[in-house]
Amino acid sequence: MSRQDTLKANKAAEGHSRSATTPMKRKEFESELARLQVELVRLQTWVKATDARIIVVFEGRDTAGKGGVISRITQRVSPRVFRHVALPAPTERERSQLYMQRYIAHFPAGGEIVLFDRSWYNRAGVERVMGFCTDDEYKRFMRLVPSFENEIVDNGIILIKYFLDVSQDEQRARFADRIDNPVKHWKLSPMDTESVRRWWDYTEAYQDMLRATDTEACPWYIVPSDDKRRARLNLIAHLLSQVPYEKVKLKLPSVPKAEGRPKGVEAGLPSKHIVPERY
């Protein structure tokens, strides 16, 4: 390689490094997001046309941005096709069932995409760290989950698993922001903030989880998420690349000419109660 080529390569590498550390401007982010959301609509049309079934699992550290990326995915698509599933703590009845049972109840039918905002992997993360399951229950889960996921894929369902990772300093900063910002107070819970204190317990649990369940048939995809905007775009672009969808030609309707107003029918709606125009 000549000196000139070396200088060009170094300059390109420096540019890549800067782009990875410099915050993405909102205008750039929104422009690229809009393009990806058009593709999500095309994916939706293909899923409906082919009766495809897709499960996307979103796991990750607290504050890593699972809810944020899911909201960008579902922003411009139909909730009848893209279903966001975020299950609360199990009821007494659910605790007496097979562990996987309450998750299977939300699996997609033909023409649906289910986005699990946390999933059956709760057992490998929070339940293990916080002592919500026994050692035997945890070991049984870790032993059985690869074959469980193989059955999902063998049944024709596309299964994609994402783990959103965030650094320890960034997690602390995001929790501090939630405490300071009233519109984010609903995101706070003692269980979440405990993850700050137990950072290394969760690190070990996630390492064990990935070693045992990152299989050839159902791999994990790690999403570095300290930069929220880049993480969201990277994940959505990757998600689209994992599904063999094609553009489906639509027969779009034309806007018809409105019929004339019949005699005796007044324009407007009769009401004494109108919302004040304050803006």
Image (tube, rainbow, N blue to C red):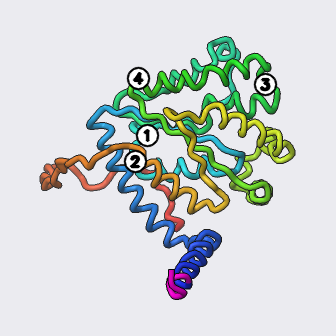
Q: Name the residue under label 2.
A: 77
Q: Mark 3 points at which residue?
A: 132
Instruction: Give the answer, above or below, for where 176 lies relative to 122.
Output: below
Q: For the image shown, how many numbered marks are present on the structure?
A: 4
- For badge 3, the amino acid type reads Phe
Which segment is the magenta one? 1-6
Is residue 188 a member of the stretch shown in magenta? no
**Sequence order check, earlier mark of 4 and 1:** 1
**Sequence order check, earlier mark of 1 and 2:** 2
Mark 2 closeness class: few <14, some 14–19, many ≥20 residues within 10 Å: some
Do callouts 1 and 2 mark residues in contact (Cβ within 8 Å)? Answer: yes
Left or right relative to 164: residue 31: left
Instruction: From the image, state whether disc 4 or disc 2 is nearer to you.
Output: 4
Q: Which of 129 and 2 is in front in this view?
A: 2
- For badge 1, the amino acid type reads Phe
Instruction: Give the answer, above or below, for where 157 lies relative to 84.
Output: above
Q: Name the residue under label 1.
A: 82
Between marks 3 and 4, how big is the CA–CA gap?
31 Å
Mark 3 closeness class: few <14, some 14–19, many ≥20 residues within 10 Å: few
